Image (spheres, grey):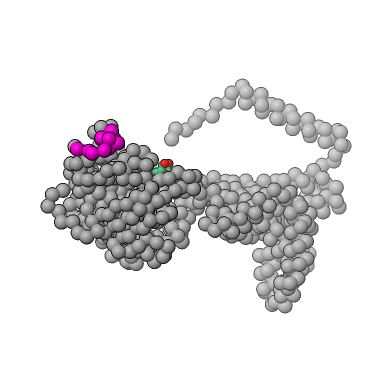
């Protein structure tokens, strides 16, 4: 995107390694730095380590070595730090993961009340304005099972935003959706990007990448193969492996 | 939903005829082969008897046994649920120690003949633990009303120690099965639910309390209710340690009256009434839960 002011580095990832107990090496000395308000699109073949990278960023997965720092807070063994980072990093999953036993309102209210210690009315006010923003204020009293996939994913985004995160992670947020619903979710994500949210987005949606992506990271076998501007990676890739992959998905 | 028409097929008729024939033959063998004289009139007095002194109808042996069975079952379920939940949580704990603890408990109990377990635990609990607790002395020192209440809820003061020993034994036995129900219920919840809650900043305890348990309980309740029915039936096993529940009373009565078939049919019917009532309750519960939300 042109004309957007990028700030200082909010995410710093230094040579992280992650080997799963079964011996699979998911991340191999992976490093990257992400600026405030930057929208980074992560692409790569299945098993490249994209999800593992995102999950390391919010502490869902532990890494074996290297360092991750988010907004100056190191993601180490310190419980306080880990908690702080979980609060500041929102995540949207491929399969929504809404809480099925709660209404939409309760889903979005929950963490505000439990973690941010707001009372019910304050939380509800925030929730309603977020539901407005994602376009489904009339569904507040519905249960997730009564919503379409696209609506569920928009609730999931609202739920993450309710924590007022500094960073949002999207792991193939539109892959499980019917084609006609992808647009409505991407629109919400684009709005967020334009508002200056720092976003790390794993996606196959090249249209989205071109429109709001500031940078593309192409990963394979747990490392960065190539990274650069959207234009550079999509139209003029330098590495053979990148060219191959781009050829497959475009 | 469409209502299914009940249609009687020829096969149904044949099966019914066979069952009827078997029943008639059985009755015939009892009458002719055993020369059994039925004496159903004798049974009601063992259910309730008229007490001359107080001028009231009071429960007699069989009904007393029934009440003891009910008390054992209800309290046993409460205790077993508590123990089972704790052990079930241990089984999925992050700590290897707790996992081992839960695992050992479940495997040990489930792989032991219940009768052996009863003997071991009963003699240990009643011989070693109860005297230390001093339960008997404690209850005998209480006021009349407390003792009455205790009798109503548990057992007469003189039987209290035996009753609690049996109760603990039953709870330890059933707890192993409940632990597995709890573990399975929690593990059946999608991993994504934990992850979403984690990503929102909820603590481990909050994830459990607000996200996982409410969903798991919906899946745990029906099998748990089924386990309650099992416990009613399994409670008969404590008759071997002279707890005067339904089966024990049946054996006692049979030894003195020789009304073998009448007594055991009565007792069977009483067990059936208890378990069948519970089954119906479970079914309604399941229907209501299914209707709740998908
Ligand atoms: N919990 C796990 N246990 C063992 N191996 C895992 C686990 N999660 C991921 N892996 C392995 O780690 C590697 C990287 O997985 P990851 O999910 O990060 O890939 P991805 O780039 O997100 O792929 P996809 O596009 O299929 O989602 C893969 O080889 C995968 O099989
Ligand atoms: Mg993935």
- In the foreground, B187 or A40: A40
Queried whether the magenta region covers residue A166, the answer comes back as no
Give the side of residue B6 with respect to residue B231, left or right. left
Give the side of residue A175 with respect to residue A231, left or right. right
* Prevailing secondary structure class for the magenta stretch in the rendered image: helix
One can see residue B61 in this view: no
- In the foreground, A155 or A238: A238
The stretch in magenta equals A236-245
Q: Quadrant of the C terminus of chain A?
A: top left
* Residue at point 74%, 75% (across, down): B137
One can see residue B266 in this view: yes
* Residue at point 19%, 37% (across, down): A235
x%, y% of residue A188?
22, 48
* Residue at point 85%, 41% (across, down): B37
x%, y% of residue A118?
32, 66
- In the foreground, B142 or B111: B111
Compared to B71, does A170 lie above or below?
above
x%, y% of residue B258?
85, 47
Queried whether the magenta region covers residue A240, the answer comes back as yes
Give the side of residue B242 with respect to residue B194, left or right. right
* Residue at point 40%, 45% (across, down): A26
């Amino acid at each position: 995107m042109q004309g957007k002011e990028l700030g200082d580095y909010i995410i710093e990832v230094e040579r992280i390694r992650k080997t799963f107990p079964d011996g699979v090496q998911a991340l191999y000395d992976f490093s990257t730095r992400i600026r405030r308000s930057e929208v980074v699109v992560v692409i790569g073949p299945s098993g490249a380590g994209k999800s593992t990278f995102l999950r390391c960023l919010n502490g869902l997965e532990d890494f074996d070595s290297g360092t991750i720092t988010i907004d100056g807070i190191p993601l180490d063994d310190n419980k306080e730090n880990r908690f702080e980072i979980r609060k500041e990093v929102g995540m949207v999953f491929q399969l929504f993961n809404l809480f099925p036993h709660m209404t939409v309102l309760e889903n979005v209210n929950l963490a505000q009340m439990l973690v941010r210690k707001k009372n019910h009315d304050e939380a509800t006010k925030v929730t309603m304005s977020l539901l407005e923003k994602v376009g489904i204020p009339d569904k507040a009293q519905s249960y997730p099972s009564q919503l379409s996939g696209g609506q569920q994913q928009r609730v999931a985004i609202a739920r993450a935003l309710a924590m007022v995160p500094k960073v949002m992670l999207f792991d193939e947020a539109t892959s499980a959706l019917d084609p006609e619903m992808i647009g409505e979710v991407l629109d919400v994500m684009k709005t967020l990007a334009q508002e200056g949210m720092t976003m790390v987005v794993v996606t196959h949606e090249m249209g989205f990448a071109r429109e709001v992506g500031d940078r593309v990271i192409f990963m394979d076998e747990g490392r960065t193969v190539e990274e650069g501007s959207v234009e550079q990676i999509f139209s003029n890739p330098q590495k053979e492996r990148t060219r191959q992959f781009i050829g497959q998905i475009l | 939903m469409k209502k299914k028409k009940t249609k009687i097929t020829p096969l149904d008729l044949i099966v019914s005829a066979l069952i009827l024939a078997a029943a008639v033959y059985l009755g015939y063998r009892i009458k002719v082969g055993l020369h059994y004289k039925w004496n159903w009139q004798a049974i009601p007095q063992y259910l309730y008897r008229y007490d001359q002194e107080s001028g009231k109808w009071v429960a007699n042996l069989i009904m007393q046994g029934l009440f003891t069975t009910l008390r054992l079952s209800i309290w046993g379920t409460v205790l077993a649920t508590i123990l089972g939940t704790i052990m079930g949580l241990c089984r999925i704990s992050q700590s290897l120690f707790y996992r081992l603890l839960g695992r050992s408990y479940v495997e040990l109990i489930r792989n032991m003949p219940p009768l052996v377990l009863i003997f071991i635990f009963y003699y240990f609990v009643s011989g070693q633990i109860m005297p230390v607790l001093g339960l008997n002395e404690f209850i005998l020192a209480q006021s009349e009303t407390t003792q009455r209440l205790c009798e109503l809820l548990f057992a007469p003061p003189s039987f209290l120690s035996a009753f609690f020993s049996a109760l603990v034994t039953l709870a330890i036995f059933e707890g192993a099965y409940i632990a597995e129900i709890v573990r399975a219920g929690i593990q059946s919840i999608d991993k994504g639910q934990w992850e979403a809650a984690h990503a929102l900043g909820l603590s481990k305890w909050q994830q459990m309390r607000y996200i996982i348990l409410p969903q798991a309980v919906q899946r745990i309740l029906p099998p748990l209710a089924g386990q309650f029915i099992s416990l009613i039936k399994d409670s008969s096993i404590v008759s071997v340690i002279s707890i005067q529940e339904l089966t024990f009373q049946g054996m006692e009565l049979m030894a003195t009256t020789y009304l073998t078939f009448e007594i055991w049919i009565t007792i069977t019917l009483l067990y059936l009434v208890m378990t069948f009532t519970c089954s119906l309750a479970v079914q309604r519960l399941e229907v209501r839960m299914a209707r709740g939300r998908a």
